[in-house]
Each structure stands twice: as C-alpha cells, then as structure tokens.
Image (cartoon, coloured by chain):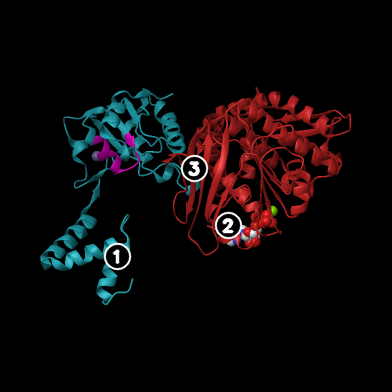
Amino acid sequence: MRKMKLLNIRLAQFKNYPQANFSFVGGINCFLGRNGIGKTNILDAIYYLAFTKSAFNAVDKDNILHEESFFSIKASFEIEEKAVEVLCAVRLGEKKMVRWAGKEYERLSEHIGKLPLVIIVPQDTDIVREASEMRRKFFDNLLCQLDQEYLKLLVNYNHLLKQRNALLKSFLEKSRFSAEQIAPYDELMIPLALNIAENRKALMEKFLPIFKAFYQDLSDGQEEVSINYDTRVNNSFENDFKAQHQKDFRQGRTTLGIHKDDYLFLSEGKAVKKFGSQGQQKSFVIALKLAQFDLLKTSKNQKPLLLLDDVFDKLDDKRIAYLLQMMADGRFGQIFLTDARPERSKEYLRNIDTDKKFFELDLKTQENV
Amino acid sequence: MEFSSKLIESAVTEFSKLPGIGKKTALRLVLHLLKQEEDFTTDIAQALTEMRQNIKYCKKCHNISDEDICNICTSHKRDNSIICLVEDTRDVLAIENTSQYNGLYHVLGGIISPIEGIGPEDLTLDSLMERVSSPDSEVNEIIFGLSPTMEGDTTAFYISKKVKQLGIKTSTIARGIPIGGELEYADEITLGRSIISRTAYE
Ligand SMILES: Nc1ncnc2c1ncn2[C@@H]1O[C@H](COP(=O)(O)OP(=O)(O)O)[C@@H](O)[C@H]1O
Ligand SMILES: [Mg+2]
Ligand SMILES: [Zn+2]
C-alpha cells in the first residue's frame, strides 16, 4: 500500500489563525479546546489541501482572516518516502494558487484526487435528510477523487448548463424561443450527461456491497438497506431532453439532466429520509462515509486522510465504539479529530495502540509560530 | 499616492486606466513625458486622437483597417475560397504572424455567451452569412479559429450548422494550443502548424 503522511501545516491568515504551525503524527491527531477556538478550522485547512476549497464555505475570500487580503496554507507531506510541499493560497482579486512540489497547477482540477481524503462532520445527516443536491455532491466528491476525467465531464456539463439556463432565461424575458440557439447546448450536453450517468451507475455497483456490509455491521437491525441511483438519463435521454424544450422554455431553466439525479436511500424498501429513525439515519451516514473510505483505499491503494469533526459528541456509544474498534484494528491511516472535551477523547483513545498527539488549543495557539 | 500637482494626478489617473498599468507605472510614464520636449507629448496625443477618430473596421471582414475594405480583403494574393473565423483583431495578428495562412478572415467581435448576455445578434454573424451566400462568393471552407473553451465550441457549433446548409465545408484548427491559452498566446510555430493540420468539423 502507498504511504502518505501529512507532516505539518503552516497557516497564515487562514480563518481565525493569523499565524500557526502544527506538526503531526502518523496516527491520531486530536484538536481539543472550547467551542469557537478554531478546531474545525484546522480540519478545513487540511480539506483545502486536498480539494482546493473549503468543506464549509464555498466563497474563498470568506476564509481569509477578517480585515486581511490573503491566506496561505503550506503543508509538508511524505508520500512514498518522498517529501512533497503543497501550497494553497488565496489573495483578494487574484486567481487561487495551488502548488505541488513547487510547481503551480494550470488547472486546479489536475490536483483533485492526489491527496485522497474523507471527512465526517455533524452536518453529514444532511446527506440523508436534505435535497438531492447533497447526495449528488457526496457521490460526485467520491467519483472526482477516483477519476479526473469524471471531474472534467462534470465541470464542462455544469458550465454548459449555466449557459443554457441563462439562454432560457433570456428567451423567457423576450417571450421567444429559438431552437437554433439552444441546439449547440443540447448537442454538447447530451453526450456529457450520458457519460456522467454511466459513471454514476458504475460507481454504485462497486459502492453498494461495501456500503451494505458496513451498515449491517453498524446496526443491530437485520433490515435490508439499499441505494437506488435514480436518473432519467438513459437510452431515451436524447429524445426526452429535446422533447422537453417547451417545458424548459416556460420554466426558464433546464428541467432534465444529470443535475436532477437523485440517490434513493432505502430501508426495507422505504425511504430512510422519511421513515428512518434518527439512529438509522446516522448509521446510514457513517456507513456511506466508511464505504467512501474503503473504496478510495482500494482504488488508490492508499489510505485516505480521515477528518473526524466532533464525532464523539454527535454519535451514540455504539457507533463510537465501532469507529474506535476500526481505529484499533488499524483500518484507518492518519486521523485528524476534534473534540470540545479533552478528557473524553483521551479516555476513548487510551487503549488504541498507535502514535497520538493532543493539541490543546487556546487563544495562544492562534499566535504560535 | 499623494501628488503635489493636480495636473500630474489626473494624468496618472488616466494612464492607470490602461490594462496592465498600475499607479506606479503610470507615474513613471508621466514623469518620463515631462522630461521630453513638448512636441513628444503633442505627437503622442495627436496620434492617439487621430487613431481613435479615423479608425475603420473593414466592411467585409470587420478587421481594423484604414480603408473601407482592409488590405487583406483587397489583396489579389489571398485565397478567396477560405475564411478563418476569429473573435477579434488580435487573433488576426497572431495568425498573420505565422505566415502559414493565405485565406481571408472574418472577425466576429466576440463569442456567444448567454451568461454575459452575448447572443448571435451581437456578433458580426449576419454580415458573415451575407458574405458567404452572396452570388459572387468563392468561399467553400470556413476555419474556426476560436478559443478552445466551451464558448468557442458552442459558437462554432451554432455557426457551423448555419453555413453547412450553404454547402460550405467547416474545419477547426487543431488543438495543439496550450491549455487555457487563447489564440493570441499560442506561439507562432504551434499556431502555424495547427492551421495547416486543421481537422474537419463534425
Ligand atoms: N475568516 C475568518 N476570520 C476570522 N475568524 C474567523 C473566520 N472564519 C471563521 N472564524 C472564526 O473561527 C471560529 C470558529 O472556529 P471553529 O474552528 O469552527 O471552532 P471550533 O473549535 O468550535 O471547531 C469562530 O470564532 C469564527 O468567528
Ligand atoms: Mg467545530
Ligand atoms: Zn477585410
């Protein structure tokens, strides 16, 4: 298995950190301290290194320390015994910069997937409870980490979709539809949509058995769970898409396509979103994330970085015990976790035999250099 | 920046409106002008004003020109059967610099992008259609020299459909052009080669 370790990060003006350095161990790194002190922000900095964006705030400039004009996150990785420096910097009014071993990427998409990462956060229950967008995001995140070609398809599709929607909106304003003007978007989007749907379908075939195994492990219930990839992008898509023109025109946006896909989460054939208990929903989410971890691990032959935000606070004893057992069994690689209650984490992790480091954050940490 | 003279300040402000010119560079230019003979500044100002007042766009290809019809369009040495379609005048210059192309041009004046509110009617498309469908037109091929972006692709698609109905071949210059690079930035050799090895547009 390929070895990857984050050795240290240096933050400058990132979120609440004017300056801060952290050196990590290869096992479990714990960020402890009262709420609002900046624990999650450190996880977000690590997330930035993998995805060139925040896990929480899509607007880059909002992650700059208030009143400042830039932030930078510098990190040293050790990958297969080689040192690799990774830099991510955002400056107001400039293009975001990401460097790998001193070399700047022409396109940020070239970076995605190089540092596989899985994050578990309290907001993850949104994946089950909220709109389809959250589920697409979850599976797209996995697909993009697995395959840069997929990311390119998705970027191109979304770009064309924006243009097509803008065009439809202008049709609506002028009360005039032009088949001639919409045609280029149709012709370019249809093959992309078919390709993306194909990828999503293929992923589900690999993902589902892994997911089911984790879910059974996590829950007492013998219930049968499943995930249905729900799409109208199929054999008749080309015709369907074009047959939708009048509807698209009336609504001023594209009403059919992979941006409407959903994933139905089922337990005994019923929607977990509607009928699942809180416990079932939580097991569902954890099983999704663990399956994501496993699939990345086998595909990349490398253990992804694992970020755990407040999991000891949000999960019940049984699911915590399950995660701790996985840690004890060495199923994970390098872990970064946060907890507002230092004693609790120390107690939980006491019997896990791996190198551990506890970062007790206080107001001084933010200034440490 | 604090200036001891309002005159300097306003000259600096004007200069720094230019692309790529910051306040510092603007100040350097202004102070340089001050050191020269007065004629120097008058000549520049006059050249700029005349350029702005008298510049024309070729009635045929919409390239910048001194005459109603530009010297590429009037030249007897050019191949009247091919038109290379580009976004703006800079692209014409870039392709001319390769010395690999001997056909005519058509400057679209932009690219279709509904997000930016730019539709076919904002480009010189009607004039292109008139040009290629007129009875004395010799045009039998249109080369798309548009930038390798989604907008370049959709614009090419749109136009290609229109001109194919007239029985005109379409092709696109080979994408040897650096990623993210606009035509203007492609080096001359790559660009020249890609015009020669252009591929039929599907
Ligand atoms: N751009 C920013 N500039 C300054 N402070 C910020 C910025 N973004 C977030 N913060 C601060 O970070 C703190 C939250 O940090 P967080 O890591 O979420 O805390 P916790 O330790 O509870 O996980 C808040 O006090 C918030 O005001
Ligand atoms: Mg937090
Ligand atoms: Zn001309």
Tag 3 residue:
A86
Which of the numbered marks, if any, corresponds to residue A40?
none
Magenta range:
B85-96
* Quadrant of the image containing the N terminus of chain B: bottom left
Tag 2 residue:
A15
Kindly report which numbered mark, 2 or 1, lies closer to the viewer in this rendering: 2
Q: Which of B131 and A51 is in front in this view?
A: A51
Q: Magenta residues: mostly which secondary structure? A: helix
Q: Are marks 1 and 3 in contact (CB under 8 Å)?
A: no
In the depicted structure, whether residue B159 falls above or below residue A21: above
| CA neighbours of label 1 inside 10 A, class few (<14), some (14 to 19), many (20+) | few
In the depicted structure, whether residue B104 falls above or below residue A35: above
Measure the alpha-carbon separation of dots 1 and 3.
41 Å
Q: Does the residue labelled 1 lie within 8 Å of ligand 3?
A: no
Same chain, labels 1 and 3:
no
Q: Which of A59 and B88 is in front in this view?
A: A59
Look at label 3 and name its amino acid.
Val
Look at label 1 and name its amino acid.
Glu
Q: Position of residue A357 (x, y in %)?
A: 65, 47
Tag 1 residue:
B14
Q: Which of A23 and A178 is in front in this view?
A: A23
Residue A176 seen in this snapshot: no
Residue at x 61%, y 51% (from the top left corner): A42
Look at label 2 and name its amino acid.
Lys
Colour applied to chain A:
red
Q: Is mark 2 within 8 Å of ligand 1?
A: yes
Tell me which chain appears cyan. B
| Chain at numbered mark 1 | B
- Is B199 left, or right, of A282 in this rendering? left
Same chain, labels 2 and 1:
no
- Is A287 left, or right, of B1 in this rendering? right
Q: Where is residue B113 in the image (x, y as percent from the top left)?
A: 46, 43
